[in-house]
Every structure is written in structure tokens, then in C-alpha cells.
Amino acid sequence: MPPAVASVPSLDSDPRSSFVSMVTPAAIAVRLSGRPRTAILLSVGLAVLFTWAGLGISYYSPHPVSFFITTLAFAGYLAVRGWGYIAAQLV
């Protein structure tokens, strides 16, 4: 009997997903931090977080990995923009 092999979701080679993976965490980080070094570190951390979360979710779903990575990153960007708008209205 051959050993059991787990199926791993395939990573898409869509150029839009790599663009979103680079730009969206940076856009979030710039909104959250005014210092360049902090923004760069935060951007890298968010990119890793979105990637691993997308991989984890897609492992249990038939949808491609890039869908979840892009959705998580966009949801994070909307949350940061919404929080900034609400904060500006309260001042």
C-alpha cells in the first residue's frame, strides 16, 4: 500500500496576485505608521500573515490560494481605511 499523500493547494502564477501581495500590505502599513522603517517591517509582517492565512484557509477549500490572500489583504485595507474615516469623524 503506498503512503498517504496530502493534497496541497497549488499556488497560482497570476501576476495580479503577486502585485496585490506586494502593494496591499505596504498600503496598509503606510496608513498605520508614519515612520519608514516601521512601515517596512509592518508591511513584511502583514504580507507573511496574509500569505500563511490564505494558505491555511485554502487547504480546506477548493478555491485557489490567491483568492484568499487577495481577499484577506483587501479586507485588511478596507478595515484600515474605515478606521481612519471613523477616527477623522470623531475629531
Image (cartoon, rainbow, N blue to C red):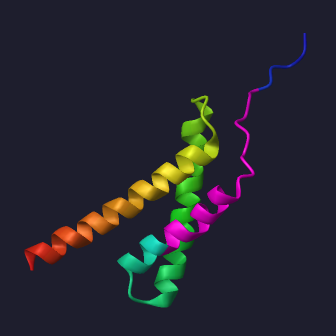
Quarter of the C terminus within the rendering: bottom left
* Residue name at image x 53 percent, y 53 percent: 70
- Establish if 6 lies above or below 56: above
- Establish if 70 lies above or below 33: above
Nearer to me, 46 or 78? 78
- Exactly how many numbered labels are in the figure? 0
* Residue name at image x 40 percent, y 59 percent: 76
In the rendering, at what x and y percent does residue 56 appear?
57, 41
User: Does residue 18 appear to the left or right of 67 in the view shown?
Assistant: right
Nearer to me, 5 or 33? 33
- Establish if 77 lies above or below 37: above
Quarter of the N terminus within the rendering: top right
In the rendering, at what x and y percent does residue 44 appear?
57, 71
17 is within the stretch colored magenta: yes
User: Does residue 89 appear to the left or right of 28 in the view shown?
Assistant: left
Q: Name the residue furthest top.
A: 1
Q: Name the residue furthest right.
A: 1
For residue 90, what is the image quadrant? bottom left
* Residue name at image x 61 percent, y 29 percent: 62
In the rendering, at what x and y percent does residue 23 appear?
55, 70
For residue 18, what is the image quadrant? bottom right
User: Does residue 80 appear to the left or right of 72 in the view shown?
Assistant: left
Question: Which residues are the magenta region?
Answer: 6-26
